[in-house]
Amino acid sequence: MANSPPIFPPYRGRFAPSPTGPLHFGSLVAAVGSYLEAKSRQGEWMVRIENLDPTREIAGVSGQILNTLQALGMESDSEVIYQKQRYKTYQAALAVLERQHLVYPCVCSRKEIADSTITGIDGPIYPGTCRGRFLHDQCPGARRIRTDNRLIQFRDSLQGLILHRLHSDIGDFVLRRADGVFAYQLAAVVDDAEQGVTHVVRGRDLLNSTSRQIYLQQLLGYPTPSYLHLPVVVNARGEKLSKQTGAAPLDVSDPMPQLMMAIRFLGQAPPAELIGSDVGSFWKWATEYWKPEKIPQK
Ligand code: GLU
């Protein structure tokens, strides 16, 4: 019998933490938002550990993240996948793009790139110094993809219509670093497609990545999921919460106050007495009364 393609339910969402540090309130907001979007629509929710970069991964943190999610009542509906184990899959996707003559080796230093006089929406634009280089297997350097100025547009469910032209807004971007580490943009696109993700819900800090990801989906023949970019939590100095900005790890011994805070941050109005209940009752209330139209844009 011929293999039939897997049949996916109409909604498949995901949460994709990087194990560079324990979960903090900012990551909790992304987890809760993606979880409730999925669960309120009888969808599936999957966890993917984005540990592409061994130099940034902290030992033991992946397990800690999964334990924290479990303590908070959020469990992946399918086996957790780890990007570190999927290099062959990313290499195969890179080869597809190479066959389209869209990839070139780049030996420019970080400094040369940072010195670029053209700035795009996400920092300096690569000036294209290596664009003419011929690609062969043993070429040293990073692998970059050629961009063009076709219009890439999508309607984000919260942020509205987004229009980008990659060549002038972002520039040719890296798919695989010189040390062999695959770039987030490529890995996320390959994994979202392979996991049958229909809806991506994540922080607004990744909004500018989406057009790059749509470009790769188009070239690789993947469907484009729907996107919702949540507001990002900032500290008193206006910086995005992260390990670098000193965000405190979530306290799993007392989950309710943090879940209540996260859902309030997402514009929901839980009854105050819910704080005295347990995690199960929290999710029951939250799934039933989830109103995505109440999420603030910023
Ligand atoms: N790993 C990314 C992060 O922790 C999230 C990527 C995504 O959701 O596409 O910020």
Image: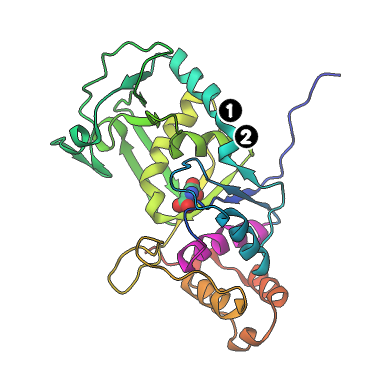
What is the secondary structure assignment of the residue under circle 2? helix
- Residue sitting at 38 percent across and 18 percent down? 102
Q: Amino acid at mark 1?
A: Thr
User: Disc number at residue 194?
Assistant: 2
Magenta segment main secondary structure: helix
Near-viewer residue (150 or 279):
279
Q: Position of residue 57 (x, y in %)?
A: 49, 49
- Which region is colored magenta? 22-41
Q: Is residue 74 magenta?
A: no
- Which residue type does callout 2 highlight? Glu
* Tag in front: 2 or 1: 1
Residue 222 sits above or below residue 105 on the image:
below
Does the rendering let one see residue 228?
no
Question: Do callouts 2 and 1 mark residues in contact (Cβ within 8 Å)?
Answer: yes
Quadrant that contains the C terminus: bottom left
Residue 30 lies in magenta, yes or no? yes
Q: Farthest residue to the left: give it.
A: 117
Quarter occupied by residue 288: bottom right
Q: Which mark is residue 89?
A: 1
Q: Position of residue 270 (x, y in %)?
A: 58, 80
Q: Earlier in the sequence, mark 2 or mark 1?
A: 1
How many marks do you count on the picture? Answer: 2
- Report the residue at 31% width, 74% height from top: 236
| The residue carrying mark 1 has its beta carbon less than 8 Å from ligand 1 | no
> Residue most toward the front?
59
